[in-house]
């Protein structure tokens, strides 16, 4: 049996679109923050490794 969904039921209200837009922006901002945090952690690990290597060579 094929069920036809009316166009009215599929159309989002202005409030629903705004809510979806805000949610999408929130998710994107959280992903960017997570990426930034991971990059900073990676840079910190690399800095420590460089310092350890420099200390090893200088001894």
Image: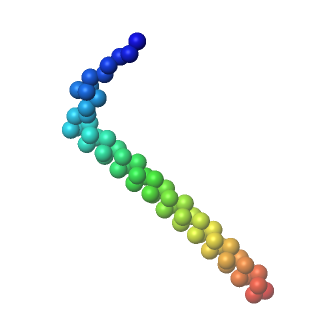
Q: On the image, which quarter does residue 33 sit in?
A: bottom left
User: At x 31% / y 41%, what residue is drawn?
Assistant: 20
Q: On the image, which quarter does residue 59 sit in?
A: bottom right
Residue 14 falls left or right of residue 2: left
Which residue extends farthest right? 59
Q: Which of 19 and 50 is in front in this view?
A: 19
Q: Nearer the viewer, residue 42 or 14?
A: 14
**Where is 15 relative to 31, above or below?**
above
Residue 26 falls left or right of residue 38: left
Which residue extends farthest bottom? 58
Q: Nearer the viewer, residue 15 or 51?
A: 15
Which residue extends farthest top? 1
- The N terminus, quarter of image: top left
**Where is 1 relative to 6, above or below?**
above
User: At x 35% / y 50%, what residue is drawn?
Assistant: 25
Q: On the image, which quarter does residue 23 sit in?
A: top left
User: At x 62% / y 74%, what residue is drawn?
Assistant: 47
Which residue extends farthest left? 14
Say how many tags the image has: 0
Q: Indicate the colouring scheme.
A: rainbow
- x%, y% of residue 19? 28, 40
**Where is 10 relative to 18, above or below?**
above
- x%, y% of residue 36? 48, 62
- x%, y% of residue 37? 51, 60
- x%, y% of residue 7? 25, 27
**Where is 24 relative to 9, above or below?**
below
């Amino acid at each position: 049996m094929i069920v036809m969904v009316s166009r009215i039921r599929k159309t989002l209200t202005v409030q629903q679109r705004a809510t979806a837009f805000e949610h999408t922006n929130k998710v994107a901002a959280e992903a960017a923050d997570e990426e930034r945090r991971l990059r900073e952690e990676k840079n910190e690990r690399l800095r420590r490794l460089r310092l350890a290597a420099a200390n090893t060579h200088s001894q």
